[in-house]
Amino acid sequence: MESALNSLIDLTEILVEAEQKLEQAIGQVTSRLREVDVSEQEDMAQVDKTCYRLHKLVEDFRKTMKEKTRTSHLKIKNLLRDVKTDLSNRLGKVTSHKHIVTRAVAVSPRPTLIHMTEAVKDRVNSLDLSATLNADCWVKPLSSVESCQEVAGRVENELLMFEQQKTESKFGYQDGDSISSAQRKRVSGVHE
């Protein structure tokens, strides 16, 4: 009878000790949960800050690339407008002289036609009749597409590598992770 009573007292002590350790472990986990919550909030704030910074860098890059693209295209458009204006002016002179020649043929009496022909011929010969476009008209504007795609690819690769590194979380376990083996042995009836 005394042996049974001692066994019950031992079991009670084991259970009390286990209960205390479990309560302590629960307290540690609760404390750790709070730490992780705070860490999560701090990390989320840092992620927001970093992403805002990245967004600003991307926006600045976008503005710079658009300005370079606009400038490159504007130079060529201005050149083409100048060429078009010059060609239009030449066309106006050619058309005007064509009308003069046509009128001269229609209204000039035969004796003055020879004199008129020489005068009109001199004027027509002084005109620039070429319609050949110089090589500048065919220059392509500097394209930003390839450089933008290259930058986007690099950033994407860096972000993917960073994401892979960060998803490999390291979990560490500490000693005292539940009821000790000595307590387990005592509960099962095995004495050391």
Image (spheres, helix red, strand yellow):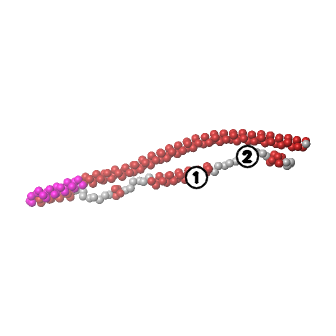
**Residue plotted at (27% across, 58% down):** 131
Q: Secondary structure at mark 2?
A: loop
Q: Provide residue 134's location: percent of width, then percent of height.
A: 32, 57
Q: Magenta part of the protein: which range?
A: 91-111
Q: Secondary structure at mark 1?
A: helix
For the residue pair 182 and 15, the one nearer the viewer reads as: 15
- Residue 103 magenta-highlighted: yes
Give amino acid for label 2: Gln
For the residue pair 151 and 120, the one nearer the viewer reads as: 151
Would you identify the image quadrant in which residue 127 lies? bottom left
Residue 119 visible to the viewer = no
Would you identify the image quadrant in which residue 33 lies? top right
Q: Provide residue 59's location: percent of width, then percent of height.
A: 48, 45
Alpha carbon separation for disc pair 1 and 2:
30 Å
On residue 161, which mark appears?
1
- The residue labelled by disc 2 is 174
- Residue 144 magenta-highlighted: no
Would you identify the image quadrant in which residue 47 lies? top right
**Residue plotted at (73% across, 42% down):** 25
**Left or right placement of residue 134 versus residue 159 in this view:** left
Residue 170 visible to the viewer = yes
Placement of 166 over or under 129, stated as above or below: above
On residue 139, which mark appears?
none
Q: Earlier in the sequence, mark 1 or mark 2?
A: 1
